[in-house]
Amino acid sequence: MSCITAKRSIVICRQLIGSFAFLIGLMGLVFADETPKSLRELDQAIDKYLMKKVGSVAAAGAPTGDAQVWCMRQYQAALKQPDSEKLILRILYSHLKKANQLAQSTDVKVRRSALAMRLEAAKSAAAHLKDKWLVAKICDAYLLPHLADCHPSNSEPLSMEDVLSTLIYCYKTAGDDKGYLAGYKLSLLH
């Protein structure tokens, strides 16, 4: 018969309180004073930014097969074109629009497709765009709030480990120290 000692129960309570305090602190780090206060405002800021850069675009068609591979191929094809940065922005914008539609689904597999599209958008933006503001904002608006859609197994694509390592890479590339530290802390907790 196992009994939890008073000392052990204090340790467990401290860990729970520390985890809760960390999550509240994380939200403060991610949505600091210089960023919009709500996810809706952040989404609108990204939409306004992309609209200014490339004009209006339609949502991408439904991804065929593996959404992550489908998106990656489109970004790779864009790199071979002249003025590839503007083309990447247009593809990224249409993918984010489609991902926003898919994220509304009650089916976790459909929401994972949305997460895959957003993950590839963040990676492509980090690797190929000069303006890194967008990279950090994609992470803030579309990756951090949707970590619950990660695959539960670390051996599968879109696992929490996979998404968090991309999040850390993107924040670091964007020069966003607060986001980088938040992603790193999350990966340590995971």
Image (spheres, rainbow, N blue to C red):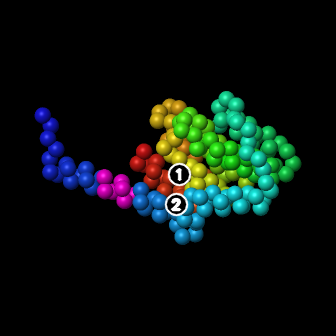
Left or right of 93 in this view: 167: left
Say if mark 2 contacts mark 1, CB within 8 Å: yes
The magenta segment is 16-22
Report the disc number at residue 157: none
Q: What residue is pinned by disc 2?
A: 30
Image coords of residue 106 (percent x, y)? 54, 38
Along the line of sight, which residue is nearer the eye, 52 or 186? 52
Label 1 amino acid? Leu
Q: What residue lies at 25% left-to-right and 50% top-to-bottom?
A: 12
Label 2 amino acid? Val
Q: What residue lies at 65% left-to-right and 37% top-to-bottom?
A: 68
Q: What residue lies at 67% left-to-right and 52% top-to-bottom?
A: 126
Cα–Cα span, label 2 and label 1: 9 Å
Most extreme residue toward the bottom, as rendered?
33
Please indicate, yes or no, whether residue 177 appears anywhere in the rendered image: no
Image coords of residue 121 (percent x, y)? 67, 47
Residue 21 among those drawn in magenta: yes
Q: Quadrant of the N terminus?
A: top left
Residue 124 among those drawn in magenta: no
Tell me which secondary structure the magenta stretch mostly adopts: helix
Most extreme residue toward the right, as rendered?
82
Q: Earlier in the sequence, mark 2 or mark 1?
A: 2
For residue 129, which quarter of the picture? Answer: bottom right
Image coords of residue 32 (percent x, y)? 52, 66
Image coords of residue 45 (percent x, y)? 66, 62
Q: Helix or strand or loop: what does disc 1 sit on?
A: helix
Q: What residue is pinned by disc 1?
A: 144
Q: Quadrant of the C terminus?
A: top left
Above/below status of 37 relative to 119: below
Left or right of 126 in this view: 7: left
Left or right of 54 in this view: 164: left
